[in-house]
Image (cartoon, helix red, strand yellow):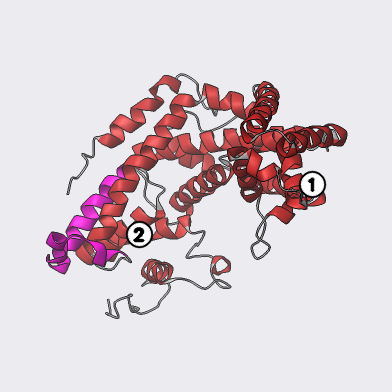
């Protein structure tokens, strides 16, 4: 099995060099940690009690919730227009589900519009709803950006009020990703606010009737498909013209290099992380490891898992799976002094703080979370050693 060189971390981070002259601002020009983020400066910002820094953190903390409110408002409009009737009623409706119906309808418009039934009419209206189509473009990475922002802030706070340890490269990586995610969430917020208007119902109805008429005409299939294609091409041209001026689409263009950098991080680190989990004898996929790995001793597998998890974390310090693999293997090899910072980082990524029972008191912890919490708390609050997930006392 191939192990990627740790130098990949430096190669990935070098993609940020183009922005190093920007100063302490995010890619959208708003206040941020900046591309030149130093570890001491990043942590000082998080610890600061100054109004400017507190305002920055308050805004960052609030962005995911603001987006959720705007998404909920859009979903209410989708419900009013009947679009949610096209979804599986046994599942809670979500915006990406509505947008997937749009993609399915565009994939085979004749099949979706030809039937004389309510669902065909709803699909035609959905395809004709240009504001919905723009929301699909704008919110493509909504969940990812919210997750990136929350995880990055959680780890930084873990380093200021917990046991998390960070290297300068990790701080730069995390700060850059927080700034990137915050920029996109702000752009989405602006675009969703602009798209809150109800739109031209008469125009939506007119376009939908045109699509239905073309799909149900008496001409042959190829003629109907050609007519639909022309009408949908016109709709797509209008959508493209409108999307070109949205904040989110323009930001994607200006941040292409940063987005490519982040995508490479995910791609390269995920392969290493998955390999680490195969080596880790206590992981859910340990039994899927190749025969040459399965025949190794527990100690050898732990060493191999730790090495691969370390390689993954050099690229992506915010991957909870890689953090847990590294923490667990480190605990086995070197004990609590070395593993506690990593278990605490894992807890931070899961939204759990060992010193704040409110973050876990009403929560059913899984085995990994319980292992991490027990290890972080062991010996700190007068408690004896606790059993790990293998049933062994430490």
SS of the residue under disc 1: helix
Q: From mark 2 to mark 1, how far is it between C-alphas? A: 41 Å
Residue matched to label 2: 324
Q: Position of residue 38 (x, y in %)?
A: 41, 33
In this view, the residue in front, 197 or 272, is 197
- Tell me whether circle 2 and circle 1 mark residues in contact (CB < 8 Å): no
Identify the mark at residue 100; answer none if there is no mark.
none
Residue matched to label 1: 77
Q: Is residue 55 visible?
A: no
Q: Report the magenta residues as a range.
A: 285-314
Q: Residues within 10 Å of mark 2 (few under 14, many from 20)?
A: many
Does residue 96 show up magenta in the picture?
no
How many callouts does the rendering have? 2
Does residue 299 show up magenta in the picture?
yes
Q: Residues within 10 Å of mark 1 (few under 14, many from 20)?
A: some
Tell me the quadrant of the picture where the C terminus can be found.
bottom left
Q: Position of residue 333 (x, y in %)?
A: 20, 63
Image quadrant of residue 131? top right
Q: Which callout, 2 or 1, points at the residue further toward the start of the chain?
A: 1
Q: Residue at x 31, y 59 (%)?
A: 325
Disc number lying in front (2 or 1): 1
Q: Residue at x 27, y 79 (%)?
A: 392
Image quadrant of residue 230? top right
């Amino acid at each position: 099995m191939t192990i990627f060189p740790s130098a990949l971390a430096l190669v990935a981070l070098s993609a940020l060099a183009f922005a190093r002259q920007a100063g302490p601002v995010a890619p959208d020009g708003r206040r941020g940690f900046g591309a030149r983020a130093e570890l001491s400066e990043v942590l000082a910002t998080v610890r600061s009690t100054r109004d400017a820094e507190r305002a920055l953190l308050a805004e960052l903390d609030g962005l995911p919730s603001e987006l959720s409110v705007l998404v909920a408002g859009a979903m209410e409009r989708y419900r009013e227009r009947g679009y949610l009737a096209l979804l599986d009623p046994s599942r809670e409706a979500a915006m990406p589900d509505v947008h997937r119906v749009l993609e399915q309808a565009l994939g085979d418009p004749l099949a979706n519009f030809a039937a004389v039934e309510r669902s065909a009419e709803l699909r035609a209206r959905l395809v004709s709803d240009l504001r919905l189509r723009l929301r699909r473009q704008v919110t493509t990475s909504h969940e990812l950006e919210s997750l990136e922002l929350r995880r990055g802030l959680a780890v930084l706070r873990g380093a200021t009020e917990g046991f998390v340890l960070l290297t300068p490269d990790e701080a730069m990586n995390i700060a850059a990703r927080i700034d990137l995610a915050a920029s996109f969430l702000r752009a989405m917020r602006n675009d969703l606010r602009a798209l809150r208007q109800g739109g031209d119902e008469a125009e939506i109805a007119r376009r939908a009737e045109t699509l239905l008429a073309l799909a149900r005409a008496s001409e042959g299939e190829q003629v109907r498909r050609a007519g639909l294609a022309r009408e949908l091409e016109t709709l797509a041209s209008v959508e493209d013209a409108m999307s070109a001026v949205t904040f989110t689409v323009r930001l994607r263009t200006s941040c292409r290099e940063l987005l490519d950098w982040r995508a490479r991080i995910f791609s390269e680190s995920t392969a290493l992380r998955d390999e680490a989990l195969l080596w880790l004898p206590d992981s859910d996929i340990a039994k899927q490891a190749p025969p040459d790995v399965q025949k190794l001793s527990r100690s050898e597998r732990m060493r191999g898992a730790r090495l691969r998890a370390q390689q993954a974390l050099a690229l992506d310090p915010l991957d909870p799976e890689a953090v847990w693999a590294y923490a667990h293997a480190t605990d086995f090899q070197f004990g609590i002094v070395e593993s506690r910072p990593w278990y605490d980082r894992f807890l931070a990524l899961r939204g759990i703080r060992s010193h704040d029972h409110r973050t876990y008191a009403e929560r059913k912890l899984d085995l990994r979370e319980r292992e991490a919490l027990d290890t972080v708390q062991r010996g700190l609050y007068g408690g004896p050693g606790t059993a790990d997930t293998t049933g062994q006392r430490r």
